[in-house]
Image (tube, rainbow, N blue to C red):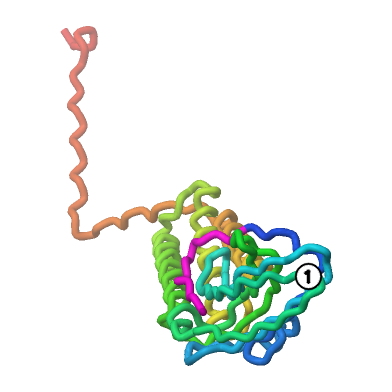
Amino acid sequence: MVTVAIPAALQPTLAAAAQPTGLTWSATINGRTVADVDSNEPLVLAGDGSTPIQLNLTNSGSTAIKVRSVRLEGRVMGMTFFRYTTRLDIVLAPGATTERRFDLDLDDLTGQAVGLIPAKFQLLDDRRTVVVEDSLPVRVRGSLTSVYGVFGLAVAGITAVLLISLLIALSQRKLPSNRWQRAVLFLAAGTGLGLTLTFTLSATRLLTPGASAWVSLVAIFGAGAFLVGYFLPLGTARPDPIDASEPEPEPKPEPEYEPADGDRLP
C-alpha cells in the first residue's frame, strides 16, 4: 500500500544510520536506475498517474536486515517540498535476495513542485531511521502555482520591495550615513536576488538547486551587494530648495547711537 505524506516545508530530515553490513541494493523509477540518474539526464516525474518502482535487495551479511519502508523526497534549501513513502515491511535473512515492485501515486505532485529539484531515495528501518539513501535530480512537470512556485514568487516579491526602497532612498540621498548600516540594507537585497535567481533557474529547468549551487549564488550576490552598500558615498538628505515666492526678510534697523555722559558737550 502506498501512503503519501503531505510536504512540510520546514520538516527536519531524520538522522541517517550506518548502512547495514552486507546490504546490496538497487532501485529503478520509471525504468531509470537511481544510481545512473545525473544532472545531465534528470529523472522526470509527473503528477498524472502511478510511477512504477522496482527495488532489489541482497543480504550478504550474517544478520537479518529490516526495511520497513522506502521514501522519495525533494528538498531545497533544507525545506521539503514533496515526500512520498511506501511501506514494505521487508525482513531480509542472511544470504537472501528479494525483489519488490510497487507503484508510487504522484497525483498531487503537480501542486507540490515544479522544475529541477534535488531528491533522495531512502530505505528506512523499523524505527523510521534512514539506513541507506541515494541522491538524484528530478525534473517535476508541475505548476507555477505549486507550493514551490508560490514560495519562489513570494521571495521574488519581497526582493523587489527591498530593491525599490533602496533605489528610492538612493535617489533622495536618504541612505544611512553609517557604512555598516547601508551595507546590511544592501546585503538583504543581495541575498534576495540570490534566492530569486535560484528559484528562477530551478523552475525554468536550468539549474538543480543543490546545496553547493544555491549557497554559492546567495553568497556571491549577498557579498557583492554588501560591498556596494559599504563603499557607496555617504547618504545625506538633500537640502530643501529656496522658495523664490517667499519675500526676503527685511533687514533690522541699526540701533541709534546714544553718546555716553562723558561724551556729551557742555
In this rendering, the answer to whether 200 lies above or below 244 is below
> For the image shown, how many numbered marks are present on the structure?
1
Badge 1 density bin: few <14, some 14–19, many ≥20, Cα 10 Å = some
249 within the magenta span: no
Q: Foreground residue, 45 or 125? A: 125
Q: Is residue 45 above or below residue 63?
A: below
Q: Main secondary structure of the magenta part?
A: loop
Given residues 119 and 188, the one toward you in this image is 119
- Please give the name of the residue rendered at 79% of the width and 72% of the height, measured from the top-left corner: 59
Residue 105 in view (yes/no): yes
Q: Is residue 40 shown left or right of residue 221?
A: right
The quarter in which the C terminus is drawn is: top left
Magenta stretch?
A: 1-14
Q: Look at the picture and state if 122 lies above or below 17.
A: below
Depth check, front residue: 210 or 229: 210
Q: Position of residue 46 (x, y in %)?
A: 52, 89
Q: Residue at 54% across / 73% down in the picture? A: 85
- Residue 81 at x, y percent in the picture: 50, 72
- The image quadrant of residue 42 is bottom right
| Quadrant assignment, res 126 | bottom right
Residue at image point 51% right, 46% down: 178
Q: Which residue is mark 1?
A: 23
Q: Nearer the viewer, residue 185 or 126?
A: 126
Query: Which residue sits at x=65%, y=72%?
Result: 90
Instruction: Based on the picture, tell me whether residue 12 belongs to the magenta stretch.
Output: yes
Q: Position of residue 247 (x, y in %)?
A: 18, 53
The kind of secondary structure element at disc 1 is: strand
53 over 131 or under it: above or below: below
Q: Mark 1 is on which residue type?
A: Leu
Whether residue 204 is visible to the viewer of this picture, yes or no, is: no
